[in-house]
Amino acid sequence: MKPIDLLRQLQEVDSRLDADRARLVEVVAELADRSAVDDARRERDVRAVTLKQIEAEQRDLELEIETFRAQLTAIENKLYGGRVGDAKELTNLNREAGQVRGLISPREDRLLQLFEAADEASATLAAAEARLGEVEAARRMDEARLGAERDTLSGAIGVDETTQASGRPQVAPATLRTYDHLRRTRGGLAVAEVRQRTCQGCRISLTISEEQRARHGDSLVICQSCGRILYATS
Ligand SMILES: [Zn+2]
C-alpha cells in the first residue's frame, strides 16, 4: 500500500476516534447530570411543605374556634338558663359573650382564607407531582438512549484503537512524526484532499504539477500553504 493510502486510512480512523471520544465525554456528562429530576423533585417537596403548613394552621384554628365556642356555650347557658337573676352579673356575662364572639369571628374569616389557600396549594402540588412524573419518565428514556450510545461509542473506540495500533507501525517513523505534528497543529486534520486543484484543508489553489503529484501518490506532497499531506482521487 502507498504511504499516502496508509495515512488516509490512519486519518480516517483518528478523525473518527476524535469525534467518538468527544461525544463519549458529552454522553457520560449527560448521564451524570440528574439536575432536571432533582429540580422537579425539590419543587414538588417545596409545594408539599406549603400545603402541610396551611393544613397545620387550619387544624390549630379549628381547635381554637372549638374551644371558644365551648366557652360561649357555657356563658350563654348561664345567661339564658334563668338561674342568674343579678342584673350586674347578667351584664358581665353579656360582655364576656361578646368578647368570646369577638375572638371567634376573625378566626372563622382566617379559616375561610385558609380553605381557599389549601385548594390552591393542592392544585399546585398536583401540577408539581405531574411535572416530576414527566421529568422522571423523560429521564428514564434519556438514560436508556445515552447508555446505549455510550456502549456503542465504547465499542467503536475499541475497534478503532486496535486499527490505529496496527496501522501506525506500517507508516515510516519520520512520516508518522510529520503526521502527528500536523494533527496536533492543524485541528486534527493532517491529510487533505485536493479537489478542483484546491487544498481542501486550507482552500488554497495548487499548481497543476502539485495536483498531478498528489494524484500519482508515489511520494508525499505537502501543501505549501497549510503544510498538510495532500491526496487526490480523481
Ligand atoms: Zn493546504
Image (spheres, rainbow, N blue to C red):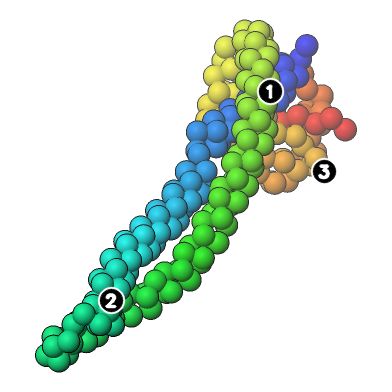
- The amino acid pointed to by label 2 is Asn
Foreground disc of the pair 3, 1: 1
Q: In which quarter of the image is the C terminus?
A: top right
Q: Where is residue 218 in the image (x, y as percent from the top left)?
A: 77, 18
Q: Left or right? Give the position of 80 relative to 47.
A: left
Q: In this view, does 167 lie above or below 119?
A: above
Mark 2 surroundings within 10 Å by alpha-carbon count, few (fewer than 14), some (14 through 19), many (20 or more): few
Can residue 189 be seen in the rendering of this structure? no
Inter-mark Cα distance, 1 to 2: 84 Å
Q: Determine which residue is flagged by label 1.
A: 152
Q: Which of 108 and 51 is in front in this view?
A: 108
- The amino acid pointed to by label 1 is Thr
Q: Position of residue 90 (x, y in %)?
A: 18, 87
Foreground disc of the pair 3, 2: 2
Residue 158 location, quadrant: top right
Q: Is mark 1 within 8 Å of ligand 1?
A: no
Q: Nearer the viewer, residue 91 or 22?
A: 91
Q: Which residue is drawn at 80% across and 31% down?
A: 232
Q: Determine which residue is flagged by label 3.
A: 196
Inter-mark Cα distance, 3 to 2: 110 Å
Identify the secondary structure beneath mark 3: loop
